[in-house]
Image (cartoon, rainbow, N blue to C red):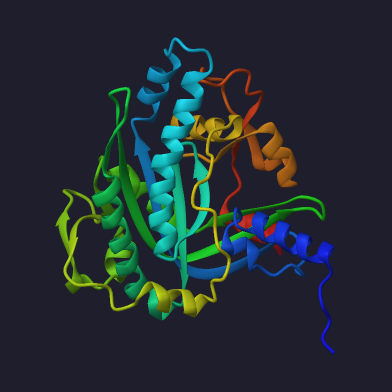
Amino acid sequence: MGWIKGEGEIEDSYKISKIAAHVPDLVVYSTLTNDIPYAENFHGVLLFADVSGFTNLTEKFSLSSKKGYGADELTRTLNSYIGEIVSHILDAGGDILNYAGDAILALWTVERVQLSEVISLVVKCSLNIQDQCGVRETEVGCQLKVKIGISAGKLSKVIVGDEISQYFVVIGRAVDEVRLAEGLAVASTIILSPNAWELCERDNIAIDPIENERAVKVRYIKREPSFSVEKYQDSIGMSVEHEKVTRVIGRKVNLAARLMMHYPGVVSCDSETCYYSKLPAFYFNELPKKAMKGVKNPGVLYQFMANKQQMYDHLM
């Protein structure tokens, strides 16, 4: 006779499933028995979607005469818009790695031989996002727009922390390239990084070159990707149903977005993140203080200074 779960166990399983729906698949399906810290290498395609118009929208709603109305409406408007973008990503098999204020970083993990096919899948997803969400009018007269960068290649997942608290970070050339690709994009456009352009099905993606750059601007896709979403999901064994509308308003989220703006080109963090990383103190240098809109008393801020070799030595 089979073992039947009790009511308490079913409830616990349900709670775990609800929590897992807000955690990247990269973490949910990771190995839990490795000693910390540790690193895993894999191949993937990254999509970086950045929403413009966020600052103007915030200022418009902050001027609302009704107490509390502005914050509620700002949250509702952004949840609706970003939630729609997230839905397109999840429907295409993407894994939401992180939110940074008004930006989204998504991942498609793949075998090396599948990179070109999955890049086409991600390009198709990006075109759908631009078609449905490229320009969105709001009730206060501000437009929300999205620009997208895509990269592909070898990546590493690094887990740091202790037995109580663990944190993950994805590093690699593709991470650097997706940030640079997004930086070359303007509102309502899609940019393929140099490596993604090298690896993709070139005969299926129409592009415009960018002057003095190896990255390219996507125009359209000529035919439907041969690698379907269902085939991709079967290949990675995806089974967690993710929440498609996620609240993205909060002090830490806003701080992360402002750090990206005011300390470009470096890995920056606050003192709490520095402490819980459990990394050596000499990996961090204190950053000069800057006035950041919407951020009061952020405390001491740090730049992460360790190079790849130092991280490798530390992990080993």
Q: Quadrant of the C terminus?
A: bottom right
Left or right of 62 on screen, residue 253: right
Q: Is residue 238 visible?
A: yes
Residue under the point 34% across and 63% down: 122
Q: 169 or 214, which is in the foreground? A: 169
Q: Is residue 293 visible?
A: no
Q: 279 or 15, which is in the foreground? A: 15
Left or right of 190 on screen, residue 47: right
Residue under the point 54% across and 53% down: 243
Q: Quadrant of the N terminus?
A: bottom right
**Image location of residue 105, percent across then percent down:** 46, 51
**Image location of residue 36, percent across then percent down:** 76, 60
Total tally of numbered discs in the picture: 0
Q: Residue 8: which quarter of the image?
A: bottom right
Q: Is residue 69 above or below residue 65?
A: below
**Image location of residue 155, percent across then percent down:** 50, 64
Residue under the point 29% across and 26% down: 142
Q: Residue 232: which quarter of the image?
A: bottom left
Furthest residue toward bottom: 1
**Image location of residue 216, percent across then percent down:** 22, 56
